[in-house]
Image (spheres, rainbow, N blue to C red):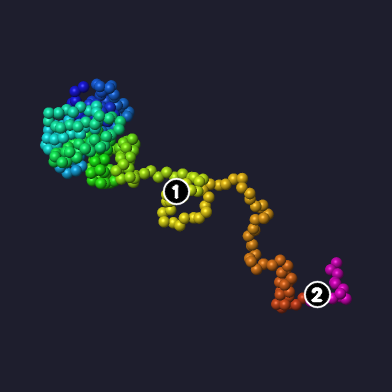
Amino acid sequence: MRKRERENPCDVCGHYHKYEEGEVCGVCGHRVAAALARPIQQSSAFPSEIVKDFLYLGSYDNASRREILKTLGITHVLNTVPTCQNLYKNSFTYHCLQDNKSLQFDEAIQFLEKCDKDKARVLVHCMLGKNRSPAIVIAYLMKCKGWRFLQSYQWVKDRRPMVELSPAIHQQLLEYERKLFGSSEAMTLQLSISHDSAASESLPSFGFGFPKAADISSAPMFNQPTSSILERSIPNAFGNDFVFGAERNIEQRMMETSAFVIVPPNASETPMDSS
């Protein structure tokens, strides 16, 4: 169907129809249910400027606004979606990536470097300007600016807040970072328990500055010989100076210190009968 100038593409199918009003798409038949309808945040007609006077990031809707592109001085367009048409071939120099699944970072960066060398302003776009085209710009910043992934992503996100990378695209960028720098700063930490001491020593330690406890088993060990409960040491509730049989000494000391001295009866004395 013919694109209608004052409409934004559908967030779901990418075609131009009044999806916020419940209109059925004339291409694929998509329609947003009334119960699922949500307020649509209208994006700007202007693309986002990532590198001043050189690199712009936007959507297919931005790429279709020829007069705005002319006003910004954009002469080259990098199309990252093979299914998107290049509308103004007589007015702009286009380069389209042909793989719909995997992004060709090196091919795209080579085109952007040529634009930079020619002092030409270039627009990088996908359907919505949220996933594929931001990934190309992030890869360009990593290779040409020497920035790591997190710094490049934050730079683009600050200038185009609607950026939302899919898990697949995010993984491709991490692999590209490893290719450029040899490692990835955005690795996901995975904690695992290993019974092999050699393997456990090779894992990174996350102690946060606390001393590492020594000889701590990673898992409980079963079927091991244990001592009898009768052989276990019983805490001494009386202290270390307690000696069995010392009650006689205690009684003798009490008799010596008592004010009333009790004299035990002799064998010749007869005890008093209390009955």
Near-viewer residue (86 or 273): 86
Q: Is residue 222 left or right of residue 78?
A: right
Near-viewer residue (7 or 221): 221
Residue depicted at 63% across the width and 65% down the height = 239
Q: Earlier in the sequence, mark 2 or mark 1?
A: 1
Residue depicted at 63% across the width and 50% down the height = 226
Crowding near pointer 1: few (<14 within 10 Å), some, many (20+)? Answer: few
What percent of the width, then of the height, locates residue 201? 46, 50
Q: Which residue is denoted by mark 2 in the rendering? A: 264
What percent of the width, then of the height, locates residue 268? 88, 76
Is 241 situated above or below 257? above
Would you identify the image quadrant in which residue 171 lies? Answer: top left
Is 3 situated above or below 196? above
Q: What quarter of the picture does the C terminus occupy?
A: bottom right
Residue at disc 2, secondary structure: loop
Q: Is residue 47 left or right of residue 211?
A: left
What percent of the width, then of the height, locates residue 207? 43, 53
The answer, for residue 185, to whether it is visible in the render is yes
What percent of the width, then of the height, locates residue 110? 21, 37
Q: Is residue 251 left or right of residue 26?
A: right
Would you identify the image quadrant in which residue 270 lies? Answer: bottom right
- Magenta-colored span: 263-275
Crowding near pointer 2: few (<14 within 10 Å), some, many (20+)? Answer: few
Q: Which residue is denoted by mark 1 in the rendering? A: 202
Near-viewer residue (153 or 12): 153
Residue type marked 1: Ser
Q: Is residue 43 magenta?
A: no
Residue depicted at 64% across the width and 66% down the height = 240
Q: Between tags 2 and 1, which lies in front?
A: 1
Residue at disc 1, secondary structure: helix
The answer, for residue 45, to whether it is visible in the render is no
| Picture disc at residue 182 | none
